[in-house]
Amino acid sequence: MTTSELVARAESVLRSRGFAVNRNARVRGLSGFLHEFALIAEKGIFTLLLDFAEKLLDILVFLAKSIDLKGYNTIIAVREDVLAELAPTLGGYARGNILVYKDAEDFERKLEQALGRSA
């Protein structure tokens, strides 16, 4: 499953829950730096920024972005095999959450669960 296919699945899940969704989001952080995310989803006062990791460095970049963004909920989706050893210790950090998935169906299920906790 490619990142673009996962983005499409996430967009579908979010729209089905009443979110307005835009791809390739850019949001300015407290530092003044412009951060990029795969999706931004908004519903009322709730805003979610969603990204995807293909390598460990993507996760570290995400954690830095999350620290710089107050007032936003952030999630990064990471395939289980990408961070097999680190997943238990990086379950959540600041305002960022790491969603670890096995396959596309597992990704959708876990995204639904995460939305149930926060939106």
Image (spheres, rainbow, N blue to C red):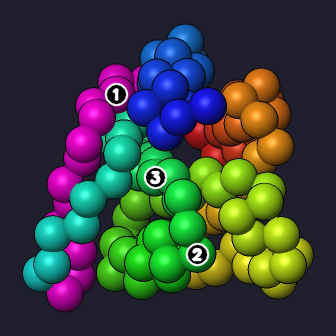
Point out the image quarter for the C terminus: top right
Residue 107 picture location, percent across and down: 72, 36
Residue at 23% x, 74% y is 29
Residue at 51% x, 52% y is 52
- Disc on res. 51: 3
Circle 1 crowding by C-alpha within 10 Å: few under 14, some 14–19, many from 20: some
Circle 3 crowding by C-alpha within 10 Å: few under 14, some 14–19, many from 20: many
**Nearer-N-terminus badge (2/3):** 3
Tag 2, which secondary structure? helix
**Nearer-N-terminus badge (3/1):** 1
Q: CA distance from mark 2 to mark 1?
A: 26 Å
**Quarter-of-image position of residue 56:** bottom right
Identified by mark 2, the residue type is: Leu
Question: Is residue 26 shown in magenta?
Answer: yes
- The residue nearer to you, when weighing 69 against 88, is 88
Circle 2 crowding by C-alpha within 10 Å: few under 14, some 14–19, many from 20: few
- Disc on res. 21: 1
Position of residue 97 relative to residue 45, above or below, is below
Position of residue 40 relative to residue 10, above or below, is below
Identified by mark 3, the residue type is: Asp
- Disc on res. 113: none
